[in-house]
Amino acid sequence: MADYTKYTKQEMQAYAIAKNIEENQIVIVGTGLPLIGASLAKRAVCPSCHPIVESGLMDCSPVEVPRSVGDLRFMAHCAVQWPNIRFVGFEANEWIHDADRLIAFIGGAQIDPYGNVNSTSIGDYHHPVTRFTGSGGANGIATYCNTIIMMQHQKRRFMDKIDYITSCGWMDGPGGRERAGLPGNRGPKMVVTDLGIMKFDDETKRMYLAYYYPFSSPEMVQENTGFEVDVSRAQLMEGPGEDIIKLIRTEIDPGQAFIKVPKELR
C-alpha cells in the first residue's frame, strides 16, 4: 500500500518551489522539478499563478507532467497557444512596462555567493575539463527577470568563485548589476536546493540560509557550501502533507518522469 506520510528530497524540493510562487505571478518554467513545483502550485498551493513555457504556451495546467516544453500534454489546459516569438515578445513587453509579475526558474552546475550561475564549462573556458550546453535562454532571463535558482546542494557546486558566469546574479554585490550595464531592479530571489532555501540579503546581496527542511539542518547546509553562509536567520520549513504527496505521485508525475519514488513508498 502506498505510503504518503513519507516524502523524498525531490518531493520536498518541489513543494518548496510551489510554496514560493505567489498569487497572480507569471511563472516561466521548463521541465523537471520547476515544472512539477509550478504544476503543484497551480493545482493546490497558489491556483492564480500562470505557468508559461518558451514554446509559446501560456497559463499552462497540464493533466500530467510533460517531458519537454514541446510536449503536447502542455496544450491540454493552456489558455493560449502562441508561437515562440510571441512568448519572447510577451516577456519583453513585461520588461518595457516594468511589470514586476514575472518569476523564472534557472539552474546550472555552479553558483557563487551572489547568485551568479555557471552552466557553460568547468575549468578554463578555452580548455575546459567539462563543457556543458551553455545558456540557452537563461542569460536573457537572468538579465531581465527575477529568478529562482534550482541547485543540488554540494560544495563543488556552491563555490566562492565560479569558473564562468553564464547567468548573472547580483554580480559582485551592491550595485554590481548596474556597473555591468544590467537592470538593478531584477535579480535572483532565492536558491531552492535539496537541503533548504537560500535568499539574498537586501544590503549585501550575499546568500544566506532562510529555511532548512525537516531532514536537514543549518550545520548540514554549511558543511555542503563552499563559502561561509549566514545561518543565523534560518527557520524550519515544515514538510508537505499526505494530500500534496499523493497529488504529486498519482496525478502530476505518476510515471516518475522527474521524481523517482522508492518501492517501499509506492
Image (cartoon, rainbow, N blue to C red):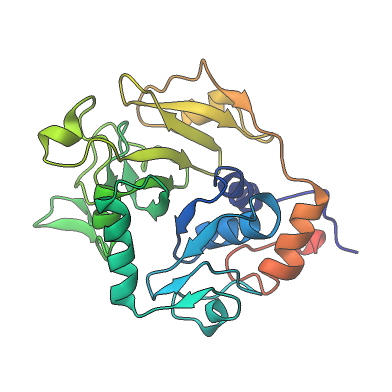
Residue 237's image quarter? Answer: top right
Left or right side of 138 for 5:
right
Give the vertical position of 178 relative to 245 (above or below). Answer: above
Q: Is residue 54 visible?
A: yes
Q: Residue furthest left?
A: 126
Left or right side of 149 for 172:
left
Which of these two is toward me, 206 or 217?
A: 206
| Residue at 41 percent of width and 23 percent of height | 229
| Residue at 80 percent of width and 59 percent of height | 265
Residue 3's image quarter? Answer: bottom right
Left or right side of 129 for 82:
right
Which of these two is toward me, 72 or 136?
A: 72
Q: Residue furthest bottom?
A: 72
| Residue at 43 percent of width and 46 percent of height | 148
Q: Give the quadrant of the C terminus.
A: bottom right
Q: In the image, residue 168 lies at what x, y percent?
A: 24, 44
Q: In the image, residue 68 lies at what x, y percent?
A: 47, 75
Q: Residue furthest right?
A: 1
Q: Give the quadrant of the N terminus.
A: bottom right
Give the vertical position of 222 relative to 22 (above or below). Answer: above
| Residue at 52 percent of width and 36 percent of height | 197
Q: In the image, residue 189 lies at what x, y percent?
A: 41, 38
Q: Is residue 262 visible?
A: no
Which of these two is toward me, 264 or 139?
A: 139
